[in-house]
Image (cartoon, rainbow, N blue to C red):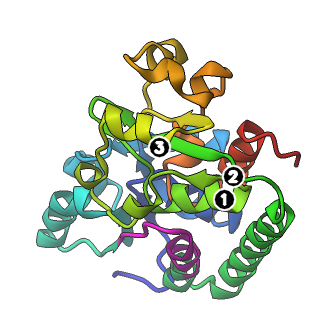
Amino acid sequence: MRRFPPQRLICLTEETVETLYLLGEQDRIVGVSGYAVRPSEVRSKPRVSAFTSARLDKILALEPDLVLAFSDLQADIVSELAKVGVAVHLFNQRDIAGIFAMIRTVGALIGAGEKAEALARSLEARVTEVAHTAKGSSRPRVYFEEWNNPMISAIGWVSELIEVAGGEDVFAHLRGAGAARDRIVSSADVIAAHPDVILASWCGRKVVPRQIAERPGWAVLPAVANGRIVEIKSPIILQPGPAALTDGLDAIRSALGVSR
């Protein structure tokens, strides 16, 4: 790292971008992922990457002090950056506790630990309050579909947020599997699980509820029979950061019929 605290930051995924904005440290961001949309002001920042690919020349031209990346899917990008001497921190949070740890770590890395601690505590309090509000209510059985072909069930933080919101993830036993291939479910699995609500977020692709409802044998599902198939937009639920704990959680609560 060239300076501490680092002044020129590049974020290769959305959640660290939003965290930095919430910390009031957005002026340090010199480059972002093409998928970064929160807050809207981020659209003015230079785009340097997709999710599994990046423009090394653009990143180097911006002379970052630190690049923030996420997961094994960006391991090749991180390796290339490390080979040319760029300082990188690779996060790999897959649950709610990991999101809070990410926020605190970002703060520590940039010399804004107190602000990060305050942000993490405020989000922790919010999640706790929502969970407390949901106690004692009926818990609808929920199938969350992260992708449609093959069908992939909820990753860790999404499964946990379903429970916080007052639902029961029908495939909760799979949420510890970080790799999507380990969360593949069959049509027969979903039919057997008999969900009351189907939530879907197809990794940036528009969800078509009719396509879900018309799957062979799915008409018997309470979620289909009662028209409870709800899309949750990817930017607010499939990035493990503040968005999932705020707007994403609220969207789940709304879909489950829980008032805010």
Q: Which mark is residue 57?
A: none
Asked if residue 241 lies left or right of residue 257, the reply is: left
Q: Quadrant of residue 255?
A: top right
What amino acid is at disc 3?
Answer: Ala
Q: Mark 2 points at which residue?
A: 249
Where residue 223 appears, x then y in whole percent?
61, 29
Q: Residue 245 carries which label?
A: 1
Q: Can residue 44 be seen in this view?
A: no
At horizontal 20% and vertical 63% (from top left) the residue drawn is 75
Asked if residue 174 lies left or right of residue 230, the reply is: left
Residues under numbered marks 2 and 1 in contact, where contact means CB atoms less than 8 Å apart: yes
Where residue 193 appears, x then y in whole percent?
47, 43
- Disc 2/disc 1 C-alpha distance (Å): 5 Å
Q: Examine the residues drawn in magenta and state their main secondary structure.
A: helix
- Disc 3/disc 2 C-alpha distance (Å): 23 Å
Q: What stretch is highlighted in magenta?
A: 91-104
Q: Is residue 102 visible?
A: yes
Query: What SS does tag 3 mark?
Result: helix
Q: Can residue 94 be found in the magenta stretch?
A: yes
At horizontal 55% and vertical 64% (from top left) the residue drawn is 28
Q: Give the camera-side residue of 80 and 192.
A: 192
Q: On screen, 259 above or below 62?
A: above
At horizontal 86% and vertical 63% (from top left) the residue drawn is 133
Query: What SS does tag 1 mark?
Result: helix
Crowd rating for badge 2 (residues with CA inside 10 Å; few <14, some 14–19, many 20+): many
Q: Residue 193 carries which label?
A: 3
What amino acid is at disc 1?
Answer: Leu
Q: Which numbered disc flags the more N-terminal residue, 3 or 1?
A: 3
Where residue 249 appears, x then y in whole percent?
69, 52
Asked if residue 258 lies left or right of residue 139, the reply is: right
Crowd rating for badge 3 (residues with CA inside 10 Å; few <14, some 14–19, many 20+): some
Q: Which callout, 3 or 2, points to the residue nearer the camera?
A: 3
